[in-house]
Amino acid sequence: MTKYLLHFPEKWQFNAGTIIDDIIKAFSREHRDVFSAIRTAIVGSINGINWLLSIIPWWLLILAVALLGIKVSGKKRTGLLYAVMLFFVGSCGLWEQMLETLSIVIASVILSVIMGFPLGILVAMNKRAEGIIRPVLDLMQTMPTFVYLVPAVILFSTGKTPALIATTIYAIVPMIRMTSHGITHVDFEVVEASRAFGSTTMQSLVKVQIPQALPTIMTGINQTIMMAMSMVVTCALIGANGLGMEILLATNRTEMGKALMPGISIVAVAIIIDRLTQGLITKKEAE
C-alpha cells in the first residue's frame, strides 16, 4: 500500500513519446521522396549562398562592412571597429567557417521572413487566426531548442537541412510577433482616414499600415537574425558545419583555447549584424 502512495502506479503510465516517435518515423518512410526533394532544394540554396559569399574577396567584405558601419553610425571609429572584428575572425583561421555559418543564418532568416511576415499580417487582421497562432508561438518560445532537432533529424537526417529547419522554427517567432504588433499599433485615425478616402482594406494595409509599421517589422527581422545566430552551436550537434562545429569539436577534445576563438568570432559577427540592423532601424524611424 505504501508503494502506491509514494510512487505513481505503473499501470497508469503510458509512453506517449514512443507513440509520437513511431508516427514521425512512419510519416518519414511514407514520404521519403518528398523529404529527399526538400533536402536537395535546401542544401542547394545554402550552398548557393555560401558560394556567393565565398567569391567576395575577404578584404572587400571587410571594407564593405566598415563603410556600412560608418554610414549607419556616422562614426569612422565604429566602422574601423567592425573591420578589426572581422579581421580577427580571419586571423584565427575561421573565415571559411564564418561564411558557412552565415550561409545557414541567411537562409533561415530569408525563410523566416517569407513565412513570418504574412503570418504576422494574418494574426493582426484576423482574431480567429490570432487565437490559434499565438498559443503555438508561446509553445515554440518556451520549448527547449533541442526538441526541434529530433524530428528534423528523423525527417531529413543530419547536416544542413535539419539545421535550417530547426533554426527557422526557433527564429520565426519574433518575426510573426513584431509584424503583428507593428500593424495592430498603427494609429487608428490614420487607417480610418485612408478608408474615408476610398481605400479598400488591402490598399490600406499595403499603403498605410505596413509602411507605418516598417520600423517595428525591421526590429522583428533584427531579432530573427539574433535568434538564428544563437542556434549556431546547437545546430552543430546535428552536423551543421561552421563556427559552431569548431566549438563542439574543441569542447569534445577539452581544448579551451580552440573553443574560445570560434566563440568570440560568433559574438563578433552577432554584434556587427545587430549594430548594423539596429542602425538601419534608427535611420528609418528618423525619416
Image (spheres, rainbow, N blue to C red):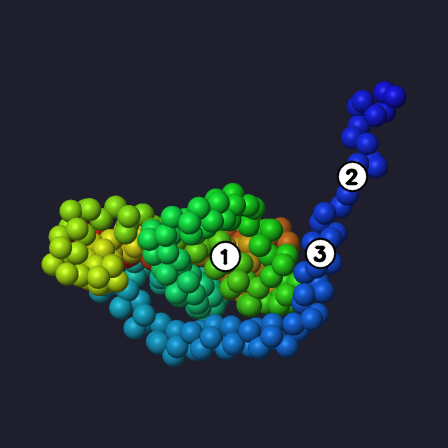
Q: Where 38 sits versus 173, above or below?
A: below
Q: Residue at 35% x, 76% y: name it.
A: 56
Distance CA(mark 2)–CA(mark 1): 31 Å
Q: Residue at 45% x, 55% y: name it.
A: 171
* Amino acid type indicated by mark 2: Gln
Between residue 133 and residue 33, name the one nearer to us: 133
- Contact, mark 2 vs mark 1 (Cβ under 8 Å): no
Q: Secondary structure at mark 1?
A: helix
Q: Where 127 sits versus 109, above or below?
A: above
Which residue is under mark 2?
Answer: 13
Q: Which numbered mark, 2 or 1, is in the foreground of this view?
A: 2
- For the N terminus, the quadrant is top right
Q: Position of residue 219 (x, y in %)?
A: 30, 52
Q: Position of residue 228 (x, y in %)?
A: 45, 56
Q: Position of residue 223 (x, y in %)?
A: 37, 52
Which residue is under mark 1?
Answer: 169
- For the C terminus, the quadrant is bottom left
Q: Where 72 sits versus 33, above or below?
A: above
Q: Earlier in the sequence, mark 2 or mark 1?
A: 2
Between residue 57 and residue 217, name the one nearer to us: 217
Q: Is residue 97 left or right of residue 65?
A: right
- Label 2 crowd (10 A; few <14 / some 14-19 / many >=20): few
> Which of the 4 image quadrants contains residue 250?
bottom right
Which residue is under mark 3?
Answer: 21
Distance CA(mark 1)–CA(mark 3): 19 Å
> Which of the 4 image quadrants contains residue 34?
bottom right
Between residue 204 and residue 8, name the one nearer to us: 204
Say whether residue 134 is visible. Answer: no
Q: Position of residue 65 (x, y in %)?
A: 28, 64
* Amino acid type indicated by mark 3: Asp
Q: Residue at 84% x, 37% y: name it.
A: 11
